[in-house]
Image (spheres, helix red, strand yellow):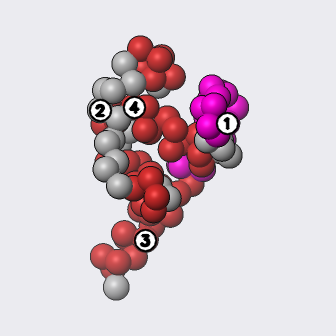
Amino acid sequence: MTYLHRNSPQSPASMVLTKVQMDVLIANTPPKLKNGVECTVDWAITAIARLGGYLEHRKRTAIGIQVLWRGWLELETLCQGWLLHLNLKLRY
């Protein structure tokens, strides 16, 4: 995923993420950043890093692998909760 981010950041995020993962990232995006969201690999990596504690500064520092892993684990946890919620909605 980081290789794709470096070489073709404008590729669609659907190349590396499932629909559920993209829905969770869109739902978790702050309101100020939701206007005109393009689901690219660059957007997905930044959104995952934000889940891992990455703070976007004016300088736009590089995203570290540790922050990206923390964000990925948080994304997986949120996706499990998202799917559990959908299952409950269908059941009741």
- Considering the numbered disc 2 on the image, is that residue within a helix, a strand or a loop? loop
Q: Amino acid at mark 1?
A: Val
Name which of mark 2 and mark 4 comes first in the sequence.
2
Disc 3 target residue: 85
Name the residue beneath numbered marker 2: 12
Determine crowd level at label 3: few under 14, some 14-19, many 20+ residues with C-alpha closer than 10 A.
Answer: few
Q: Main secondary structure of the magenta part?
A: helix
Q: Is residue 90 above or below residue 65?
A: below
Circles 4 and 3, Cβ within 8 Å, touching? The answer is no
Residue at the spot 60% in from the left edge and 32% down from the top edge: 60
| Residue that appears at 31% across and 50% down | 36
Badge 1: few (under 14), some or many (20 or more) residues near its Cα, within 10 Å? some
Out of 59 and 28, give the one closest to the viewer: 59
Q: Amino acid at mark 3?
A: His
Q: Earlier in the sequence, mark 2 or mark 1?
A: 2
Disc 2 + disc 1, Cβ < 8 Å: no
Tag shown at residue 41: 4
Secondary structure of residue under mark 4:
helix
- Residue placed under numbered mark 1 in the picture: 67
**3 vs 2, front mark:** 2
Task: Please say if the residues under marks 3 and 2 sit with CB atoms less than 8 Å apart.
Answer: no
Q: What stretch of residues is rendered in magenta?
A: 57-76
- Kindly report the distance in space between the C-alpha atoms of the residues bearing marks 1 and 4: 16 Å
Asked if disc 2 and disc 4 are in contact, CB closer than 8 Å, the reply is: yes
Tell me the quarter of the picture where residue 87 sits. bottom left
Q: Position of residue 29 (x, y in %)?
A: 47, 55
Please state which of the two labelled residues, at mark 1 or mark 3, is closer to the viewer: 1
